[in-house]
Image: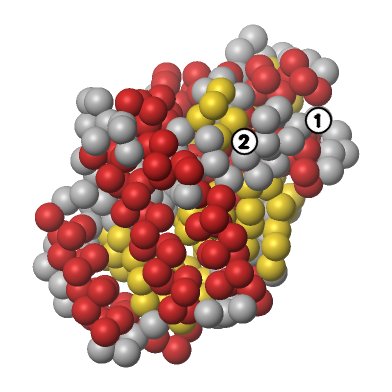
Amino acid sequence: MSENMATARACANIAFIKYWGNTDDLLRLPVNGSLSMNLNGLYAETTVHWDATLCEDALILNGKPAEDAARQRVATHLNMMRERLGLTGFAAVESQNNFPMGAGIASSAAAFAALTVAAAQAGQLELSERELTTLARLGSGSASRSVPTGFVEWYAGETHEESYAESFAPPEHWNLVDVIAVVSGEHKAVVSARGHQTASTSDLQPARVRGAAERLTVCKNAILNRDFAAFAEVVEYDSNLMHAVMMTSRPPLFYWLPATLTIMQAVRLWRTEGLSVCYTLDAGPNVHCLCLGDDAQAVESRLQGLPGVEKVLVARAGHGAEVITPTS
Ligand code: DP6
């Protein structure tokens, strides 16, 4: 590999306490802190080559030249890295995801975490993990949480430097599994960035934000104590609150499909029957069914029997973003 080139891999992550709305849309400073787990095996792999002969940034996405909107978003992120880090020239970027994009499995989180780490490494910059999380955040807020390992907290902060993410438990701390019911692999109609901008038009957003710090503490303690009952209660509540804000924003955002609600109701029923499982949803119709490792197989096979479930993906807690040597 040439010396201005590097490849990084970063996992997607699932938020347990959600990020929804910014105090500064440009810097992506969120209105509340959030918590997540990296999803092992669901990743983006991105190669960046700083190339002095290019006259603009180029993007190959999943093997094909990317559409202009995606290329532009990457170029905007690279502009910001050039400005902040003194990098010069343009970059050829090649990125692949191994999971469906744009359907509530945060593809932008994995993509911008991998892009940031690869771009810094290819530019021969030695940045701290904390700094990498702040830079990744500028590309996609949730990407900040895909840089550190395992279970991660993103501090809201009031400035660029203060709004960073860090790990609070390694992947092996708790055998929690995300069994994802994919009800639609199609690209979502409304990108998260639009939703963050309209969140404040919901009368419910102030109430959601007011309780967020307390929910975060409860959730973090539940994870640290491996207390599934406490975890399930706060995670479902936080997801419901965010979707209530989405549905009452102006214009409203409805991410659920009929199958989404069927699954949510089934998960609550299965919990009363003794399975350690709860649900959470991001900005899409797919349902992330979080369960203890011992119940993952039962949850997976029950989901496969529900109407409208196109496929089921299974992910345990994953590591942080890393520079890799590509195999091909
Ligand atoms: C619902 O990080 O995708 O998944 O900063 O505009 O890229 P941008 O938004 P994004 O928002 C994620 C929202 C969420 C909740 C979460 O992951 O915390």
| Residue 74 image offset from top left, x and y in percent | 55, 26
Q: Which quadrant of the figure has residue 188?
A: top left
Instruction: Compare residues 120 and 209 and report the one nearer the observer.
Output: 209
Q: Amino acid at mark 2?
A: Arg
Q: Quadrant of the N terminus?
A: top right
Pointer 2 with pointer 1, Cβ within 8 A: no
| Residue 227 image offset from top left, x and y in percent | 53, 80
Instruction: Compare residues 261 and 108 and report the one nearer the observer.
Output: 261
- Whether residue 107 is visible: no
Image side of residue 183 versus residue 314, left or right? left
Task: Tell me the SS state at disc 2.
Answer: helix
Instruction: Compare residues 39 and 248 and report the one nearer the observer.
Output: 248
Q: Residue at x 31, y 32 (%)?
A: 202
Q: Does residue 205 lie above or below 69 as drawn?
A: below
The residue most toward the top is 55
Q: Residues within 10 Å of mark 2 (few under 14, many from 20)?
A: many
Q: Tell me how the rendering is colored.
A: secondary structure
Marks 2, 1: nearer the viewer: 2
| Residue 175 image offset from top left, x and y in percent | 55, 80
Q: Amino acid at mark 1?
A: Gly
N-terminal of the pair, mark 2 or mark 1, is 1
Image side of residue 204 versus residue 14, left or right? left
Q: Residue at x 33, y 26 (%)?
A: 201
Task: Tell me the SS state at disc 1.
Answer: loop
The residue identified by callout 1 is 123
| Residue 291 image offset from top left, x and y in percent | 42, 77
Q: Residue at x 26, y 73 (%)?
A: 267
Instruction: Compare residues 73 and 256 and report the one nearer the observer.
Output: 256
The residue identified by callout 2 is 137
Image side of residue 184 versus residue 191, left or right? left
Q: Does residue 13 lie above or below 61 as drawn?
A: below
